[in-house]
Image (tube, rainbow, N blue to C red):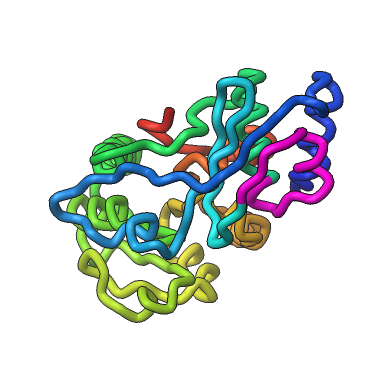
Amino acid sequence: MIDFKSELEKIATENNLLDETIEIKPVNVNLESKTIDDYPLMQGKEFLLRAFFKGDVGDAFTNNLVEFNGKLSEVIASGTDQMIIAALNSVMKHLKMVEKSEHCVKGEPEVCAKELSEFLMEEYGKEIKIGVIGYHPAIIRQMVTTFGKDNVIATDMDLDTIGRIRQGIVIMHGSMNEHLIEHSDIVLSTGSTAANGSLEEILSYTKKYDKRIIFYGTTVACAAEMLDLERFCALGK
């Protein structure tokens, strides 16, 4: 699996960027919805760290509020995993190694979810079982609307969400990820798995059961590029 710190150091060294300044701080994402009020970002359960590097930005979801302003080499030496990933996304965006490393805004998550459902319909038709790893209300609601609640299962790690009906289905505990992958035709996973340490396990399960997995969002931009993972991010910046 990727050692994000080593990869950042390698890329920064090769491109003479170690002494360049980078700023990393939490940002508010302007999400607006008339029908969805439980985005984790809107409820303060997750935060978005944004790295600003030479005019480009990179995001990483986190539950740890931190701020930094200094040399890229200092982030590499002492930054948290989430800081490293945000920095890596911004540096790779600057070097044109990744695209769409900045979170979408306003009602765009719902538009993205609709485009994702249309993409899946074109690939598979309507009779498909979909597993969603990570509670993303817009995506789960759209999958339920398009494919039916009996064809969608989802997991999350938030204790306020687990075991409750959200967007028409009961959200299972993240410890059920293997069960979800085994019993799905296709898996949709939040890119936050790259930042919370669960990516390797999830990929091992998809390999074990030979299942296609599509990651969504901005956090996973660098990991998707390095590991050649399929990624859907229709409206990231």
Q: Which residues are magenta?
A: 67-83
70 relative position to 181: left or right: right
Is 80 a magenta residue?
yes
Location of residue 70 in the rendering, given as x and y in whole percent from the top left corner: 73, 36
Q: Relative to 129, is 124 above or below?
A: above
Location of residue 210 in the rendering, given as x and y in whole percent from the top left corner: 57, 54
Name which residue lies at 81% across and 26% down.
19
Q: Relative to 84, is 233 above or below?
A: above
Of 147 and 139, the residue lying toward us: 139
Q: Relative to 157, is 64 above or below?
A: above
Name which residue lies at 85% across and 22% down.
14
62 relative position to 188: left or right: right
Residue 228 falls in image quadrant: top right
Residue 201 falls in image quadrant: bottom right
Name which residue lies at 43% across and 28% down.
237
- Does the rendering let one see residue 179? no
Name which residue lies at 30% across and 57% down.
137
Of 60 and 73, the residue lying toward us: 73
49 relative position to 19: left or right: left
Location of residue 152 in the rendering, given as x and y in whole percent from the top left corner: 31, 62
- Does the rendering let one see residue 185? yes
Of 52 and 186, the residue lying toward us: 52
Residue 149 falls in image quadrant: bottom left
Q: Relative to 199, is 100 above or below?
A: above
Residue sitting farthest toward the left: 34
